[in-house]
Image (spheres, rainbow, N blue to C red):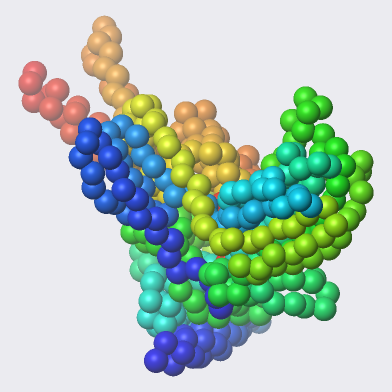
Amino acid sequence: MQTTWAYISNYSVYSAMAIFTISFIAHAFETAFAVRAPDAADSTDGNLLLKTLDYKRTEKTARIATAMMILGFILLLAGIVARGISNGHVPWGNMYEFSITGALAFTGAYLAALRKYDLRWLGLFVSISVLLTLGTAVTLLYRDSAPLVPALKSTWLVIHVFAAIISGGVFLLANVVAGAYLYLDRLESRGPRPAWLQRVPSLEVLDQLSYRLVAFVFPLWTFAVIAGAIWAESAWGRYWGWDPKETWAFITWVAYAAYLHARVTVGWRGRRAAWLCIFAGSTFLFNYVYVNVWGSGKHTYSGL
Amino acid sequence: MTSAPKDYTAWVTITDNGRTYKKEIKVNKPLTFGNTRVYLQANGYSPVVTVRDSQGNVALQGPIPFLPQDGNLRSIGSIKVPDAEPQIGFVSSFVPTNARTTDQGAVSIFPELLDPKLLFSIWKGDLGLDSGIPQSVYRIDTSKLEKVGLGSVKPGETFTYPEGSITLEMVIPWVNLQFVDDPGKSYALIGAILAILGLLSSLYGRRRRIWVRITSGGVEVAGLAKNSAPGLDVEIEKFVSAIRGEK
């Protein structure tokens, strides 16, 4: 019975990857074909001819792209739930399980933000990063479904890891936005934006968005670290021991705290703030990848 | 992941002012006793051995703690016999469930005592225990010793060599318990909770300042929103009309 669920989980994750691929292609198609070459009629007023974006032409593709993203999210969610059933515990016991859950959180953050903001331009980046994450997970990180090691058997696993995964997903989304800001900032310093980027919001909006994402999730990250400390107190006999994972979680916390201070107190905006945001996000990624794969410490479980 | 442990539990008996009761200690469930918490940190095996000299006199008897090396509790250790003449040392490894591989020698394939075996090389000479330099209880410096033989025993078996014999009587488990009294713990927790509350109010609160200046020409009103919270204009207009209303 457990193996059946494990198979269901694997097939759901594979199907989700296929669906995300379709979503990626649709996003790429939309971005490429919405560019409208100037008509001869436009040139009569003597103005500079610019390629424009006409999303009416690709509305259907855009809808498909978002629908596929939602479908992929549902399949991935099903895959993670099935994995949990086959394990007999929340599926956050090793790096494969963290990665697929992280991909789910990332997609979920994008879809949730999409309801409020016109973020569809971000879909191309979101679908490709989710595909890369899932691809790495199923090829390099996959481990057979297994029971939890004794040290992970605790309610805190759910609380601590859930908070950490959600924080990670939103931090990385903020990083993508900050990266988009820096790229567009460079392009705009040389002239008008190319047509395919015209729907991306203005630099001011991007700047605000990455700040809001970080400000929204920073208390949750603080909570994740504190919940980890409370758990460590009952599992390892100390609430803080400068384990590599703990130390890097603290470094990430300090980096984001510096970012928020730089914005709110000192008034950093734009390029400098975006770089600081990306730096803080990279400490999170470093903690996730390096400490799990090459590091040694109490957070290294079951191979990966 | 096969043959991975599912659970560790230590059953302990507590005696407190003549009152005796039984408790469990698990990895995520430390035992709380007053202000002290007792944690189950590690476990392993201690082979109980009897070492005799060539006349048959007991030179050493008792459990020797061994240090686990992997998940299946393949352990290393040393049995030092300073009271034998000459002194004897066993550089040993212990496997709870014995199996042989061609490349690694003896390995353990299960953490429980299904087919335990003690393997050793025997050395004689000065163990260096009287040199005054501290040394590991798990290792023997063999640079000044002479190798006498190589052997292995299962429980109940005796291995004989020219200088004497070694018998593996039985194998008992050991646990590593950590006793912690951390009086600052609750202060750290209160501090952490206050930090989160402070963060929430400073990040999500709408901080804004309004200045009112009375000049000869009338009243000037200015405002500043700290974390660029929207809606300041509306608030200032309301404020201004409120002032006007009072006049």
- Measuring from the top left, give residue B46's x and y in whole percent: 58, 55
For the point 57% across and 39% down, the residue is A242
Would you say A173 lies left or right of B58 here? left
Q: Is residue A163 above or below residue B238?
A: below
For the point 47% across and 86% down, the residue is A6
- Measuring from the top left, give residue B135's x and y in whole percent: 75, 35
Would you say B160 lies left or right of A303 here? right
**Residue B93 visible:** yes
Q: Is residue A18 above or below residue A85?
A: below
Nearest the viewer among B79 and B7 is: B79
Would you identify the image quadrant in which residue A128 lies? bottom right
Q: Is residue B164 above or below residue B233?
A: below
Would you say B135 lies left or right of B182 here? right
Q: Quadrant of the N terminus of chain B?
A: bottom right
- Looking at the image, the residue that sits furthest to the front is B55
For the point 83% across and 74% down, the residue is B103
- Measuring from the top left, give residue A53's x and y in whole percent: 57, 74
